Each structure stands twice: as structure tokens, then as C-alpha cells.
Image (tube, rainbow, N blue to C red):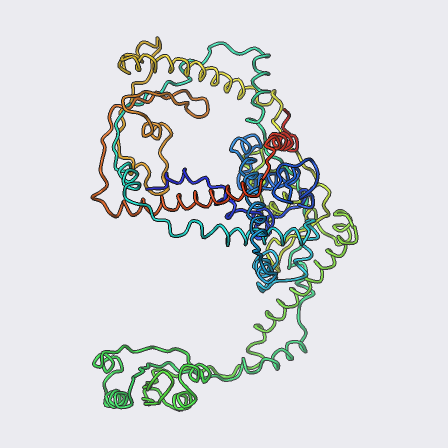
Amino acid sequence: MLSFFRKFLGSRIGAFIALAFLAIIAFAFAAGDITNTGGLGSIGGGGGTAAKVGGEKLSVADLQARTQRIFEQERRSNPGLQINEFLAKGAVEQVYDQLIAGLTVSAYADKQGMSVSKRMIDGQIAAIPAFQDASGKFSEDLFRQLLAREGVNEQTLRDDISRDLIGKQLIGPANLGVRLGDSLVLPYASLLLEARAGRIAAIPAAAFAPKTPPSQAQLQDFYSKNAERYTIPEQRRLRYAVIDATRFAGAANPTDAEIAAFYNQNKPKYARSETRDLERLVLPTEAAAKTIAADVEAGKSMTAAAQAAGLAVATLSRQTRETLTREGNAAVAQDVLVGKQGDVVGPIRTALGWQVLRVTAINVVPERSLAQVRSEIVTALKSQKVAQLISDFTGKIEDQVAEGATFDEIAKDNGLSVETSPPVISTGQNVQDPTFKPTADLQPLLKAGFDMTADDDAQLVPVVPNQRYALLDVSEIIPAAPPPLAKIRSLVVSNLAQSQGAAKAKAVAEQIRAKVAKGMSLEDALKSAGVPLPAPQRVAGRRADLMRGQQRPPAEIALLFSMAPKSVKTLSIPNDQGTFIVQLDQIQRADAAKQPALVENVRTQLSQVTGGEYADQFERSMEKELGVKRDTAAIAKVKQALRAANGVTP
């Protein structure tokens, strides 16, 4: 309901604590997203200075590299994202502010004598999943390999983690304990109960689209100016050779000697076993336990005896000597295991209290001979052998890659069949064939395939861990670009007509708005347009209902709730579909004073916002004290460089 208040939360320092430096390096490792697209070895490099914080400098190259990294991460979840769209959201400005905030907090902490211990940093590194082995433990070898592969300096990583921890310690407390008074909270809470009514008219672009086809010059001009609109995301053609466990099935059959040895090594597993199913009661005194035991021995059920004492029976299944000793003690285990079905055991004193047990079933599994378990052993041994053979085989291939062998050489030497995908985008879609779907082998290779660069060696990628692998190579990279105009001419013609119609619809909507603002009714103003237009729709509702949960109201409804009384405004409809005319007819005020739960909810949200502002002001005061110098012209330089690096011409 109150999520719309979060638009006030634009705290640079809040973003710093959430992202900081760690988000660019360590978080990327944690998410498994580090790729070798230039690495972070250039951090602190040349290209001019974007900001100075004490003795530290933020280079233009650093700002560009980190913004590029975030762009690449965003494109993994949204392959259609274009650099201009990304930059239009203020990405460079946000990263710029966050990096300066990080340097500022770090420098201020140094000035105050604050520091982070090596042990704390080690703990953060060890917690990053990408540095952990299959058992979930930190691997020094894996850590070194990843840093070397990505060209990330260990000290740079440690410095980033240190800044993140310092930021949390220094800035985090600034927004704690904030509680706002009713005089500030009530107006916002009452705002949620406010009801509004109005009318919305749509001026469709289709009503004003030109009837004559455009000239070639017009079409070419529109296509050139809107090239990004038609840009196809980067495509890649992947080659891969699958290695499956079935390849080794014939060589994995165990011998009779191996089967016998396995049986002898695991004899306890195949020996006769006996377990007990039990009912159990634990009582605080021996006297109470004796009474229960006597009642059960006299014929009363354990459940009835327990209910009479206000207790409940615990049911225990498949109990062995080990579990009985653990749950009770050695005496319990001994007495239960010698008891017959239906026998009452106890009372016996244990750490939990006095136990009374009843044997409800005796489960006997007879000894199994080698002949009886032979097939089971064959399956287990074959699985072990296949795992070892595939491990040896993939290890051999990795050695060949490390020694410089090409994809084709490795495939030929090992008798691997090579498959080649059509050009696909990172989601696996084929732009030329909408019916195409990645195979079960290709789908798991997409992420690795799009993380690789054109110069990378072939990689061995698990398709099904321990069962199926693929040697992967990128055979072709098709940069993101719009298709030739000739291929999409009909689409561009349609879009141009839509755009021209939208421009005319906007002009007509502004004329109608002006008439309504001077007193003409919306209905009459629409009729004066000279073309048939849809009748206005009446809308009404409460702000709280529109903002409930994560729901977001349509833009035209949101505009209605931000307008002054009796006003009229226009709003473009997305995708050049036309223009809305929004007229606010009525506002019904409300008082939230009689709804304390709502007031407290609003107080909590506004207190979080205010806490963020306190933290933001704290960081600004640090900048002032340290004499931070910004070169905002660096933002324009970085934007220009990012456009060029991502194939967008000025």
C-alpha cells in the first residue's frame, strides 16, 4: 500500500551500502557472473580523473569499467536492453555518486582511525560462493584461479570489501532509531485515504496516421534516428561436442573379483539386522512412570494411559541400538532389544526423565548373500567406474585445452561429434526462426557461451553434472545491430506512420486541453477536433486501493492522483499510440487519525526514508569536510565512451 513513498528514497549512501564497491567485483563473483570482458584490472587506470577524495582519485576509466559491468549484468536478465535506454535511466550518474560515496566514507573512516581487520575481510571472501568448492568450503586454489582468470588484483578486491564493511559500520547507525511525530505522518497517511474522480480521454494516433506512403528519404531518416529501436541483441553461433557417461559404459563393467571385494568390504551392510518400532512416554518421576507401566501391563493401551496422565505418546520407528542409546541410554537399548513384541520396558531413568516404552513391532532383515545383492553391487561399482572414467577423460581434455589445443583438434583426437547452433541471443532464441527452441544440451551452455570472448579457449561445461559434459567454443559473434532497412521495411513504414500520427494526436490533445482549461466541457472539446474520437471514460478510486501491495497503477491514473483540483493535463501513451487527456473533477479528503494501524504503517515507511536522508546528509558532510572535488564533465565522457564501446554511433 505504501510502496509509492519509496520514490523519495534516492539516498546515495543507501545505494552505496547496498552496492558499494563489493557489488561490482565480489557480488559478481557471488552471483557467478564474472566474465572476462575486459576485467577490472584497469581500475584506477588512465583516461582522466572523474573525482578526487582526499588522496584518492576516481578515474574516468574506473567509472566507465564499472558502469559497463553493471550494463552487462543487466543485459543478462534483459537481453533487449540497449545502452541508450540504460544511460537514460541515469546509470552513469548513479554509479558516479556511489563510487564517490564509497571513497568518501573510506577516507573519512581513515581520518577517524577506523579500520577493518584482515580476519573480517577473509570471512567475507570465504563466504563468496564462487570461491567455494563442492563441499561448500573456501578453496584457496579456486580463489587464486578466479582472480588470475579475471585479471582482478587481490588487493583491489580486499580494498573493495574493506570499504563496504566500513560503510556499513560508519553509515548504518545513522538511520537507526528514527521515529517521526504525528504532525508529519498524519498528512501522508490521510493522503492514502483520499478519493478522486475524473475523466480520461484517449486521442489515438491511428486517427491521424497519414494515408499516403512515406518517401524513401523520410523512411531512411526515421530508420536512422530510431536504429536502436530495431537493434537485435548480440547473437552467437556456438559449437559444442557432448561427452556422455554412456560412452564409458562398456569399460565400466566390474570383474567378479571386484564384486566379491566390494561385498566383503561392506558385509555389515548385508548382515542380518533387527530394529524395533516403539511407543514411548517420558515422565518426570519414577512413581508416575511405574503407574503408567503397571496400567499398560494390565492391558491399557499406551495412548489411553498417557491421556489419563495428560501426556502424549511418541512413536519411534526402525530403532537400532545406536538410536536407542542416543535417545535414551545403554540400558534402554539393552532392555528394548531383548524385549518381545508387546513387552513393556521400564521405567528406566535417562537424561530426559523416566522412560516407559512398549515394543509394537520387531523388524527383521535377514542376511543377504553375495548372489542376492550381486546386481545391486554391479550397479554401484559401475556407477563409480563411470564417474572415474568420465573424470579422467574430461581431465585429459582440460589438459589439452591448457596446452593450447584448438577445439577442432581436441574433438578429432577424442572422436567427439561436433554440433553447431544457429545464431542465437543469450536466451537461446533464434531471431530468424521464432519456432526454434534450444536443445537440452544447448540450453545449459548459453550462459557460458555468452560469457566467453571471441579469443577465449574452448571450455568444458557440465550439462548434467558427473554424467554429461560439453566442450564449448564460440564460432561466431554477431554484434548487436539493427537489420537492414530492406528486411524490415514494412515494419518501419508502420512505425513511421504511427509516429507521425502520434505527433498529430499530441498536437490535437494540447488544443483540446487548452479549450477545457478555458471552460469548455471535455465532451464538447473532443467533438470540436474534426475527427471522430472515443468518448471520455469516468474513473474514480482511493489512492490506497491503487497502491495496494506491489501493484502499480497505470500512468494516466497516477497522473490523476498528482494533479491540482479542477485541472486538466495531457500524457503520451507509450509506443506512439497517442495521447491521454486527464481531467480531475473531484477530490474527497480524508482523515487517518482514526486509523492508528495505518498511521503506524506510514510512520515506519517514512522513518526509513528519513533515516536514509540522515545517512545521505552525513555522507555529504563528509564530502564537504574532506574537500571532495568532482569533475561532472567526466559523466558525459563516460556516456560517449560507453555508446561507442557498445556499437552506438553519436
Whether residue 43 sits left or right of residue 198 in the image: it is right
Q: Tell me the quadrant of the picture where the N terminus can be found.
A: top left
In this rendering, the answer to whether 256 lies above or below 428 is below
Whether residue 630 sits left or right of residue 471 in the image: it is left
Quadrant in the rendering for residue 535: top left
Q: Tell me the quadrant of the picture where the C terminus can be found.
A: top right
Whether residue 478 sits left or right of residue 356 in the image: it is right
Whether residue 620 sits left or right of residue 347 in the image: it is right
Q: Nearer the viewer, residue 395 or 312?
A: 312
Q: Position of residue 192 (x, y in %)?
A: 28, 38
Quadrant in the rendering for residue 154: bottom right
Q: Nearer the viewer, residue 149 or 433?
A: 149
Q: Nearer the viewer, residue 204 or 425?
A: 204
In this rendering, the answer to whether 43 lies above or below 30 is above
Q: Position of residue 187 (x, y in %)?
A: 28, 38
In this rendering, the answer to whether 429 lies above or below 163 is above
Q: Residue at x 64, y 44 (%)?
A: 56
Q: Residue at x 29, y 84 (%)?
A: 283
Q: Position of residue 13 (x, y in %)?
A: 50, 44
Quadrant in the rendering for residue 85: top right
Q: Position of residue 367 (x, y in %)?
A: 51, 83
In this rendering, the answer to whether 255 lies above or below 577 is below
Q: Residue at x 45, y 85 (%)?
A: 321
Q: Is any atom of residue 332 visible in this view?
A: yes
Q: Nearer the viewer, residue 258 or 136?
A: 136
